[in-house]
Each structure stands twice: as C-alpha cells, then as structure tokens.
Amino acid sequence: MKILANTSIILVLCSLATMSTHAQKLSASDSIDVFLKTKMRERSIPALQIAVVRDGKMVKDTTFGTANLEYNIKATRETVFSINSITKAFVGIAIMQLVEVGKLKISDPISLHLDGLPEAWKKITIEQAMSHISGLPDMLNADEQVLGHNDEREAMAEVKALPVAFEPGEKFSYNQTGYVLLGQLITKLSGMHFTQFIQEHQFNVAGMSLTRFGDSYDVIPNYAGAYTMTRQVGDSFVRNNVPGQAYMQFPVFFRTAAGIQSTATDLASWIIALNTGKLLKERSSIDLLWKPAVLNNGKIGGFNRLTNGYALGWPTVTREEHPAVGPVGGGRSALFVYLKDNLSIIVLTNLLQGNPDQFIDEIAGYYIPEMHQANGFGLPSNLRTLRAELLKKGFEKSVEVVSALKKKDRSFQLPENELNGWGYQLLSQKNIKAALSIFKLNVTMYPQSANAYDSLAETLEIVENKQEALANYKKSLGLDPKNKHAADRIVALTKN
C-alpha cells in the first residue's frame, strides 16, 4: 500500500544528502556513477554496465560491481549480460532488412510465408505479431515455461491447438508465439537460420565481438550470470534479503523472443550502426521500425505508463517531451533511444528485479537537466500544472491552489495515487517540507483513504512530529483495520 517504508525513506534521504554534497563538483559522468552506485545499493544489484551514446559517439562506458557472487569475480567492460527481451529489437531490424530487399511487407499475413497455420491465425499480419496485438495464444504456460519440453515441433503442435485470445488489433497483450513464428519466417526467407542471419547482418556488421545467443545452460565466457531477489514457496513467491541464483533457459527455436547475451559497449556500437545506415539503408525503415502499432480503436497499447506503446520489436515511450524507444529485458536490462535528443542510454544488470528502465530517464537528466525528476519531468500533466502553481505561490498553499485550479478548469483532477506517488518522490529528493504539504493535501482531498493518512503519518515521523504521526496512524487504522503497518507504528510510538 505504501511506496516506501519509513526506514527506507530515511536511508534514501541520507544517500541523497551525501550525493547532493559532492555531485556539484563532479562531471556529468562522475555524477551518474554516484547515482548508479546508490541505485545498486538500494536494489541489491550485484553488477551493472552502462554505455551512453551522444551525437553519434560513445561518451560513457562504465561497469560496476560483481559479476559472480559465488567466487567474488569483479565485473568488467567485457562481462556479458543476458538482455532477455531486448532480443526482440534485433528481430525487428532483421524483419526490416528483409523488407528492404523485397522479401516481405509487414502488412503481409504471416500465412503468406508460412504454411500449416491454423485457420484462425491466417489473417494475422507480421506487424501485428511483432507489436503484440495479434491475439495469438501464448507459447508460455502459466508457470512462464515454454510449451513442448523445449522441442519446437511439440511446442508448435500444442500452441496451435489453443484458441486465439482475441481478434487481431483488439488490444496489446505481450506474447511470445509471434516471435517464434517470426524466427521461422526469417529462417525461410533468408535461407539461413535466424540466429546466423542476425549474427551476420547485425552482430558482425556492428562489430559486436562479445555478443552471442545463449542461456544459463551454455558456457559463456565472462558471463555475469542471473540473480533474483525472489524464490518460490508453494504457489507464491517470497522476497529474499540477498540475491539468489536464477536459471533461464531459452530453447534455440525460442531465441527470437529472448536469447541474446551482450555488453553495453556492443549495444552502443549496434545503436551507432543503426543510426548511421549500416544495418538499415533507408531512414524510412527506421521510422517504420519505431512507429507504435495502432489498435482497432485508434489508440496504442504498451506495458505501462512509461513504455506505453509497442512498435516492431521496440517498446515506445510515446510522450510530447523527450519521446523514446525503449526495449527492456527480463526486468534487468534496458536500452532507451531518445528520438529528438541524439542520446541513447544502455543499462545492463544481472538482477532480474534491477528494473533500470525505471531510472534511465533520470540518467538522461545528467545530459538534459530538465529531465531530472526534481525538475518535474515524468509527472502527469495535472501534477505538472499543480507543481508550476505551487512553485509560484508556495507548497503550503496547496489546498487553495487546487481550489483555484478546479474553478478555472472543472475537468482538473488529482487522483489519490498520483498525489501519493509525487509525495514520495519529493521525499526521495529531500524536499520534505513540500512532501508534507502534498500528503496533507491528499488527506484533505481523500479523507476516507487509509493510505493517505498512513503516508502523512510516515512523513510526520520523519520530521519527528510523533504526536501528529500517532494521530494519523490511528485514523488510518480506523479506516482500514487490516493496516498492519499503521498498527505496528502505533505500538512503537506509544511505547516511546
């Protein structure tokens, strides 16, 4: 229910206090290093690689941490990481390479090129399969395991027997089957296995000497491994305090969906090769590659509010300011190309819950200052409007400012969860006074919300106003008797 526990807030604020003291004296690259080391501590990331491409040149290439926890092997720039579903972006380029030589059109039904598909699949286009709007049944089962015991024929027989999930173009639904079909299509039309085609036409062309296909079963020199903070207990997953081993197997026929192992440096070379015409000859091919698919209702669909669209193997960050394409992989790796800024950032980790896509925009802020969260970037438009007014009139006048904004625009809305999230973001920026005002505003606007009172109470504890904190925890518990956090804090504050 809370975004951060009280103890976590204090740790984050202490870390940021240390950062702010030194960051002014550091270069952008050094400041990024400080930021990333903090993120690694917060998220228990063993190893992390970053590469930054700006104006067509690699301007940063740095590696931190431990590649192998068992033997305490330090990560280096040659350490190889699994990029999981970023692999799909390579498939997107491979398909567009076949388009450029006249082998296919993305508007073609897949059945035009592959035989033996079920009748219900025959009108599904290549573009729909690539952008996850096909309605194909998924080749992963409920336990996230590939069907068919790693045998392609068995897997295809099983998935073909399943009903389609929805009409093509009806909605976005992440799906691996389409990429298995795309692998078969590349193999057929290129005259070589899709792994060889991608090797010859992308890895070799871009000079990606350390990049290869593989998984946890393969012996990969300088492999960073895979770690996770969760383990399965019965039907549930519980979070550990320290990373544990993760095992990921991608059968060869499945390696269009996930299966490439690479380095941040190699991926930077790949981006440079793409943008300089070495991988795709026509700029229009890249524009099409990065154009989000449109649903039948005229909208786009994606994973979340950030990666809110999906193009040809490339998730898109569709927004007015600093739009991007942002392939992400396994909750551990991310690659953002900022379309209007001549900036690309690659972050690879060996922790499945590392989620670098959640902080790549903040890294971009060291090159484009307006993109820092502290400057309001990433906030929903309504909160940006509120922030602009509060900067003029003072955060302590938040209730009055909101009232005025609503009088001016009756459609102006401030959802509880957005206010709550902004409050915690302000806390992480050490702007405690402003955060307190926002949490008080949230309580005023949503007086029946147990979570709003709980968040306010946490912040009051930070400023050592224990009496008011206790009162707000009691209000929260009264609204939600199951709120264990509030109950525990009431006991602790009462004892003290």
Image (cartoon, rainbow, N blue to C red):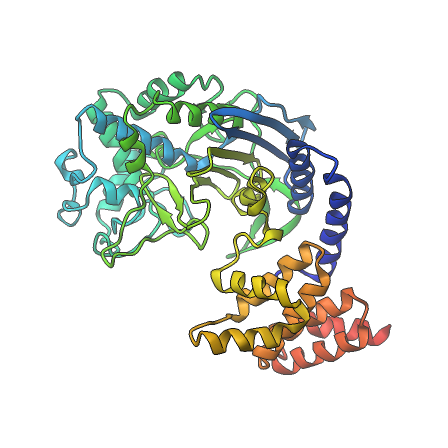
Residue 72 location, quadrant: top right
| Residue at 68% over, 37% down | 31
**Left or right of 366 in this view: 302:** left
Asked if residue 307 can be seen in this view, the reply is: yes
Front position in the image: 83 or 452? 452
| Residue at 17% over, 27% down | 103
Front position in the image: 87 or 297? 297
Front position in the image: 150 or 109? 109
Image: 387 above or below 198: below
Residue 476 location, quadrant: bottom right
Q: Position of residue 379 (x, y in %)?
A: 53, 57
Residue 468 location, quadrant: bottom right
| Residue at 51% over, 73% down | 405
Q: Position of residue 131 (x, y in %)?
A: 30, 44
Where does the C terminus fall, quadrant-wise?
Answer: bottom right
Q: How many marks?
A: 0
Q: Position of residue 195 (x, y in %)?
A: 34, 24
Image: 428 above or below 188: below
| Residue at 78% over, 43% down | 21
**Left or right of 185 in this view: 8:** right
Q: Position of residue 205 (x, y in %)?
A: 38, 17
| Residue at the extreme right of the image, as rendered | 496
Where does the N terminus fall, quadrant-wise?
Answer: bottom right
**Left or right of 49 in this view: 470:** right
Image: 410 above or below 50: below
